[in-house]
């Protein structure tokens, strides 16, 4: 389950930023989850709760926002929206796609004290 590793990394970033910015507790974390990231949201929620125990993020509310998938189609030379890694270009049906957005997980913002 790579969601656990992702949450461990998010917590590491929160702790590093805590040292730089001087906050002691995280009350809310908003993450942007790419549509093409293959992240299972419920597994991410479960993992975040487990990883946050005993840390500055224990009890923090986790909000997940969807980020659309996008790709550049080499056949029709257009940027297109993709819902899945297996989707063809919705305009021309081709598979010459270079993924450009929606692959990752990003910390959008935090509420901290």
Image (cartoon, helix red, strand yellow):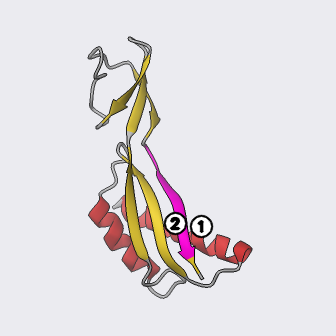
Callout 1 crowding tier (Cα within 10 Å): few <14, some 14–19, many ≥20: few
Callout 2 crowding tier (Cα within 10 Å): few <14, some 14–19, many ≥20: many
Task: Residue 94 in the image: state x and y as whole percent.
Answer: 30, 16
Q: Where does the C terminus fall, quadrant-wise? A: bottom right
**Helix, strand or loop at mark 1:** helix
**Helix, strand or loop at mark 2:** helix
Query: Would you identify the image quadrant in which residue 24 lies?
Result: bottom right
Determine whether, in the image, residue 83 is placed left or right of residue 50: left
Task: Residue 103 in the image: state x and y as whole percent.
Answer: 43, 43
- Count of numbered tags: 2
Task: Residue 48 in the image: state x and y as whole percent.
Answer: 40, 72
Q: Name the residue under label 1.
A: 13
Q: In this view, does 35 lie above or below 41?
A: above
Question: Which stretch appears magenta?
Answer: 103-111
Task: Residue 31 in the image: state x and y as whole percent.
Answer: 45, 60
Q: Is residue 27 above or below residue 37?
A: below
Determine whether, in the image, residue 72 is placed left or right of residue 90: right
Determine whether, in the image, residue 10 is placed left or right of residue 4: right
Asked if the residue under mark 2 is in contact with the one under mark 1, i.e. CB atoms within 8 Å, the reply is yes
Outermost residue toward the right? Answer: 20
Residue at left offset 26%, top offset 17%: 93
Instruction: State the residue in front, 52 or 64.
Output: 64
Residue at left offset 27%, top offset 32%: 86
């Amino acid at each position: 389950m790579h969601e656990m590793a992702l949450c461990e990394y998010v917590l590491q970033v929160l702790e590093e930023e805590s040292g730089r910015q001087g906050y002691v507790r995280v009350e809310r974390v908003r993450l942007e989850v790419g549509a093409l990231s293959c992240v299972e949201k419920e597994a991410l929620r479960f993992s975040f709760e487990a990883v946050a125990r005993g840390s500055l993020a224990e009890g923090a509310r986790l909000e997940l926002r969807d980020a659309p998938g996008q790709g550049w189609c080499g056949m029709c030379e257009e940027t297109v929206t993709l819902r899945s890694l297996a989707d063809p270009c919705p305009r021309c049906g081709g598979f010459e796609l270079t993924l450009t957005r929606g692959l990752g997980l990003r910390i959008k913002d935090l509420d901290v004290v």
